[in-house]
Image (tube, rainbow, N blue to C red):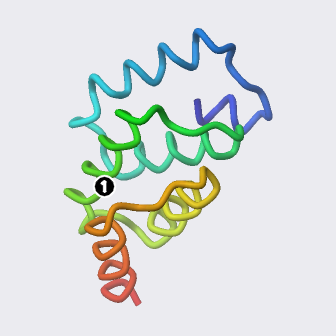
Amino acid sequence: LWALAKMGEEPDADLLAAMQRRALVIAREFIPQEIVNLMWALATMGKTADADLLEAMQRRSTALVEEFIPKGVSNLMWALAKMGEQPHEDLLEGMQWRGHALA
């Protein structure tokens, strides 16, 4: 998805749905960069993650908060805002903590 978004292209609805389903299946394997790439791509294309995927990505991000680099913190929060999604309280607190730790 990241490459398509970077090129200004959008997958058709079936491919987008399939990619989101696959991401949900492997969500526990995602590292911060993969989470950010996925969320950034969706937001850049003007899409939002399916509810289950959004939940999984927020939970995974919270679990990995100590591994996020500054750009990852920024891009994830931007993507959620662009999608019109409020981050979970735990995620928001974790990202704020991470921002302070990296400053």
Q: Is residue 10 above or below residue 91?
A: above
Label 1 Cα crowd, 10 Å radius (few <14 / some 14-19 / many 20+)? many
Front residue of 17 and 67: 17
Which quarter of the picture shows residue 57? top left
Residue drawn at point x = 50 percent, y = 36 percent: 49
Q: Classify the position of the C terminus by image quarter.
A: bottom left
Residue farthest to the right, as pictured: 8
Q: Is residue 15 above or below residue 59?
A: above
Front residue of 69 and 24: 24
Residue drawn at point x = 58 percent, y = 62 percent: 78
Query: What is the x, y in percent for residue 22?
Result: 37, 19
Residue drawn at point x = 58 percent, y = 12 percent: 15
Describe residue 65's horizontal placement relative to residue 83 as left or right.
Answer: left
Query: What is the x, y in percent for residue 61?
Result: 31, 55
Query: What is the x, y in percent for residue 98?
Result: 32, 78
Q: Secondary structure at mark 1?
A: helix
Query: What is the x, y in percent for residue 31?
Result: 31, 46
Residue drawn at point x = 27 percent, y = 65 percent: 65
Describe residue 23's horizontal placement relative to residue 43 as left or right.
Answer: left
Q: Is residue 11 above or below residue 59?
A: above
Total number of numbered discs in the rendering: 1
Q: Which residue is mark 1?
A: 61
Residue farthest to the top, as pictured: 14
Q: Amino acid at mark 1?
A: Ser
Q: Classify the position of the N terminus by image quarter.
A: top right
Q: Is residue 9 above or below residue 6?
A: above
